[in-house]
Amino acid sequence: QKAASDRFDRWDYPPGASQRRNRQADASPAGMAAIGMAPVPPGDAQALFERVFGTAATNDDYGRWENQAFTFSDAPISRFGLVQRSGGPCGVLAPVGGFMLRFLLFSNRPPTEFPFPNGFPNDDEREASLVDALCYVMFRATSASRYIVISASTGGNPSAPAMYQRVFDTIGDVQQFYANHLEQLLRQPTSVMSFVYSVLATRGLGTVAQEMDEMDALLVGRFGHCQQELLNLMLIGRATSYVCDGSEYAGGNPETGLLVTGVPDDARVEVGYLSQLEANRYLTVGSRYKCPEFPLWVVGSATHYTLLFSLSLSAAKLSPAKELQQKADAAFNKHAVDIEGGMATPDKLRDIVRELAVSYPQLNEAAIDEARRAIGQDQILLSADFRMWAAQKLLPNGEPPQAQSTTLFLMDGQSPPGPSVTKVVVEVCNIDTNMAMPDQNEFQATIQTRWPGHIVTTTPL
């Protein structure tokens, strides 16, 4: 358990600290020793490396990570964001960027328009938000008051990396350490990779292995691409392997015997996740990731991660009707004989209603009898009929009118071609979206997994 004194608070950054910083920091072994960092035992360093890259990593894949620091964008429209130099580390940069925005946009004086006013965030605010974001990820990755900051050296033999570490008892001490030595720890070529090692060491390699559905899975795959376990570790502090709510059987079929785990019930989701793989019908992202606490989402494609955000907190919330629809579908699908066809046998109706009653306790035994009389008399039970019954039962008066459009922004830090921001507008559509958007691309289809029944338009800024 965490000590009572170990609480996460925003770092109180001294005004002008970014201007007074020493830009000639020493990242050599002597420089590491000067700031209290000791060599990581070779066996421990090897274990960390192999959990991330394995034993067969190519120099090209490793090199994508060996040359990625935490670097801010210089472009006025994207100065709040981080720059990605090579393919691969986006799976860390996008979540960290999300937590930076969580502190920049939803704190003391959030901006109310985008592009942000000139000079926001200033250099002090950017550095403070980066330090806070990194430390918040580490804070959420452990239930104990023990944090390990690691710095990996460049060059040498990648399969026998040299690492340095320092252990702290409170996250406040970690914040101060990063802030005092930002150049040495966060602006070096291996800084992003070192942060991954820090989070892994803080959580514990044994714990990480137990959370994965395959205990020998790597965190970085081919072409240096982040695997789902690493992305989840950054977003929710757990190295789980899937994106569903809680645990479920693969393909929704208990007969497979393969129980997979996504976002645990007790995980706090402040930055969400949307996936192109759902648009391609390879998986379903759970509602916990789709509806995070803040309107911030990492968006995953087949090869890249970007950051989607809104200035309005309401953008993160589902309408009561949409929330009920999702939960009714989830309850139905757990007992369906044909998920794609939306069919179940009537004898499963009691189980389906009880499943939905976890979220809506007013669905008692009498409600089960009502459902049986209303929709359980045929040979096949349809998901559409169950959804309609649930809406009539739980939302008899409908719901207040919802916003007809939502404005979002997509930050892509990849360089080349250079950091960019795209305006994304989702609008309620009263006709089939396939007809309204006959030429939609994969990104638009991905956004529709969170806002079904909406058309999506994009405008580069």
Image (cartoon, grey):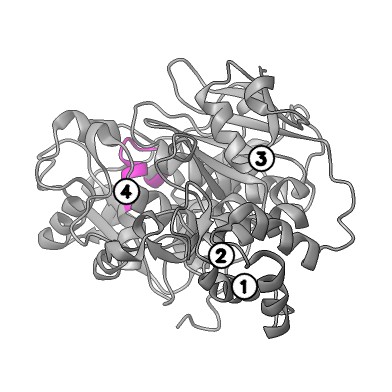
Q: Is residue 186 magenta?
A: yes
* Label 4 Cα crowd, 10 Å radius (few <14 / some 14-19 / many 20+): many
Q: Are marks 1 and 2 in contact (CB under 8 Å)?
A: yes
Q: How far is the residue under mark 4 from the one under mark 2?
A: 42 Å
Q: How far is the residue under mark 1 from the one under mark 3?
A: 25 Å
* Kind of residue at badge 4: Ser
Q: Is residue 193 magenta?
A: yes
* Kind of residue at badge 3: Trp
Give the structural element (helix, strand or loop) at label 4: helix
Quadrant including the N terminus:
bottom left
Q: Nearer the viewer, residue 9 or 85?
A: 85
Q: Measuring 67% from the left and 77% from the top, which residue is drawn there?
A: 368
Q: Earlier in the sequence, mark 4 or mark 2?
A: 4
* Left or right of 36, for residue 325: right
- Residue 194 is tagged as 4
Residue 241 at least partly seen: no
* Label 3 Cα crowd, 10 Å radius (few <14 / some 14-19 / many 20+): some
Q: Earlier in the sequence, mark 1 or mark 3?
A: 1
Q: Measuring 53% from the left and 51% from the top, which residue is drawn there?
A: 342
* Kind of residue at badge 1: Val
- Percent position of residue 334, x then y: 48, 64
Residue linked to disc 3: 451
Q: Earlier in the sequence, mark 2 or mark 3?
A: 2
- Percent position of residue 226, x then y: 33, 42
Q: Earlier in the sequence, mark 4 or mark 3?
A: 4
Region in magenta: 185-196
Q: Nearer the viewer, mark 4 or mark 2?
A: 2
Image quadrant in which you'd find residue 328: bottom right
Residue linked to disc 1: 353
Residue linked to disc 2: 331
Q: How far is the residue under mark 4 from the one under mark 1?
A: 48 Å
